[in-house]
């Protein structure tokens, strides 16, 4: 890829509003090492960069799909992701050589120095927020049989339903068991 679409050139934007169509493989946003999800489709959408004085505002939409694993049946869960972007950047007036404070917490406004903004990391974060915390293949997933592990969404397994078992095999009466055992003892 000749041009990184997530690198914003401020000087180009200073002539107005810059609009950028996005159509990149998922690796371009570092989506190939997201735990629990695989990304097979391109990230598409568009970004618009607005410059106001030295403040930069990145807006737009990013879309892609991800496949995760259902927490109940371990089957695949397909997620359509659509993230609305709204990222403000302010110019860092401090020494441009200082590394940005990565330990800062909360919704900090990102700063930039020089004439370029590398937006990939923030955009990746916004897109990943769209992933479900607890992926489920459907709201009424039946899960796996606790006895044989069969996927109950694909039909009932051969295991006997629990409450029938209890009817067929009544609990032995402890008193009878005790008497039976006594009868079995033979004294010669
Ligand atoms: Zn499921
Ligand atoms: Zn079963």
Image (cartoon, rainbow, N blue to C red):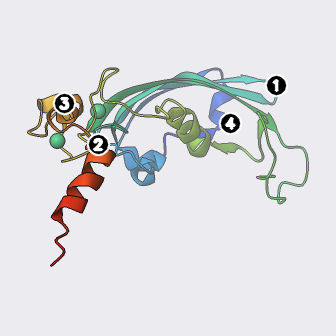
Residue 114 spot, x, y in % from top left: 76, 47
Task: Name the front one of labels 3 and 2.
Answer: 2
Task: Name the front one of labels 2 and 1.
Answer: 2
Pick the residue in front: 152 or 119. 152
Q: What residue did someone put label 4 on?
A: 10
Q: What residue did someone put label 1 on?
A: 53
- Marks 2,1: beta carbons within 8 A: no
Task: Calculate the distance from the C-alpha at mark 3 to the C-alpha at mark 2.
Answer: 14 Å
Residue 153 spot, x, y in % from top left: 18, 29
Q: Could you tell me which secondary element the residue under label 4 belongs to? A: helix
Q: Could you tell me which secondary element the residue under label 2 belongs to? A: loop
Pick the residue in front: 54 or 80. 80
Q: What residue did someone put label 2 on?
A: 173
Along the polypeptide, which appears first: circle 3 or circle 1?
Answer: 1
- Which residue is depicted at the point 80% across and 34% down? 90
Q: Could you tell me which secondary element the residue under label 1 belongs to? A: loop
Q: Residue furthest left?
A: 158
Task: Name the front one of labels 2 and 4.
Answer: 2
Task: Calculate the distance from the C-alpha at mark 2 to the C-alpha at mark 1.
Answer: 86 Å
Q: How would you rate the neighbour count of disc 4 (Cα within 10 Å): few for under 14, some for 14-19, many for 20 or more?
A: some
Task: Calculate the distance from the C-alpha at mark 4 to the C-alpha at mark 1.
Answer: 11 Å
Pick the residue in front: 62 or 81. 81
Q: Could you tell me which secondary element the residue under label 3 belongs to? A: helix
Give the quarter the ligand 1 occupies: top left
């Amino acid at each position: 890829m000749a041009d990184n679409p997530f690198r914003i050139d401020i000087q180009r934007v200073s002539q107005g509003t810059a609009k950028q169509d996005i159509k990149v493989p998922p690796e371009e946003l570092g989506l190939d090492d997201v735990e629990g999800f695989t990304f097979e489709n391109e990230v598409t959408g568009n970004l618009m960069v607005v410059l106001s004085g030295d403040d930069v505002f990145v807006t737009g939409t990013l879309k892609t799909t991800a496949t995760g694993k259902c927490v109940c049946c371990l089957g695949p869960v397909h997620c359509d992701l659509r993230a609305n972007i709204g990222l403000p950047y302010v110019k860092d007036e401090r020494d441009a050589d200082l590394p940005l404070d990565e330990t800062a917490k909360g919704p900090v406004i990102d700063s930039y120095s020089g004439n370029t903004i590398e937006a990939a990391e923030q955009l990746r974060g916004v897109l990943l927020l769209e992933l479900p915390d607890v992926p489920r293949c459907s709201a009424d997933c039946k899960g796996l049989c606790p006895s044989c592990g069969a996927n109950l969404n694909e039909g009932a397994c051969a295991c006997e339903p629990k409450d029938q078992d209890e009817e067929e095999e009544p609990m032995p009466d402890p008193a009878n068991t005790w008497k039976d055992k006594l009868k079995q003892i033979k004294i010669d």
